[in-house]
Amino acid sequence: MAKTSKPTGRKSRSGPRVPEGKAPLQVLINEQTIEDAKIRAIREKTKVSGVVEQLLQGWLDGTYKLHRKSDG
């Protein structure tokens, strides 16, 4: 009989394990913005993915409003 076990996380194609309840998301962002975000995340001892998750949750909750760019 084959042994079955519940996996603790998924493995993405690129390698690292994805924590339970999380999923990868690909977004296109200006390269300089990404670099600046990584540097600030390191200085604040956090991760960019955590910042993005908090911002998205705030947007979904209505606590964070997007600033619309004017056309003029």
Image (cartoon, helix red, strand yellow):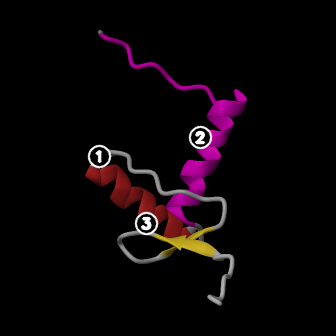
Tag 1: residue type?
Asn
Image height of 55 relative to 25, above or below:
above
* Sequence order check, earlier mark of 1 and 2: 1
Q: Image point 54% across, 50% down: which residue?
A: 52
Q: Image point 53% across, 58% down: which residue?
A: 49
Observer-side mark, 1 or 2, equals 2
Q: Image point 33% across, 45% down: which residue?
A: 29
x and y percent of residue 44 in the render? Answer: 59, 67
Q: Is residue 54 magenta?
A: yes
Tag 2: residue type?
Leu
* Sequence order check, earlier mark of 1 and 3: 1
Task: Give the left or right position of residue 22, taking residue 69 as reference.
Answer: right
Task: Give the left or right position of residue 61, taking residue 18 as reference.
Answer: right
Q: Considering depth in this image, is 21 or 29 the residue closer to the camera?
A: 21
Q: Image point 37% across, 13% down: which residue?
A: 70
Q: Considering depth in this image, is 25 or 47 the residue closer to the camera?
A: 25
Identify residue for label 2.
Answer: 56
Task: Give the left or right position of residue 37, taking residue 71 as reference.
Answer: right
Disc 1/disc 3 C-alpha distance (Å): 15 Å
Task: Check if mark 1's residue and mark 3's residue have beta carbons within 8 Å.
Answer: no
Disc 3/disc 2 C-alpha distance (Å): 20 Å
Residue at the far front in the pictured view: 1
x and y percent of residue 46 in the render? Answer: 59, 67
Magenta segment, which residues? Answer: 47-71
x and y percent of residue 15 in the render? Answer: 40, 77
Disc 1/disc 2 C-alpha distance (Å): 18 Å
Q: Is residue 16 visible?
A: yes
Identify residue for label 3.
Answer: 39
Identify residue for label 1.
Answer: 30
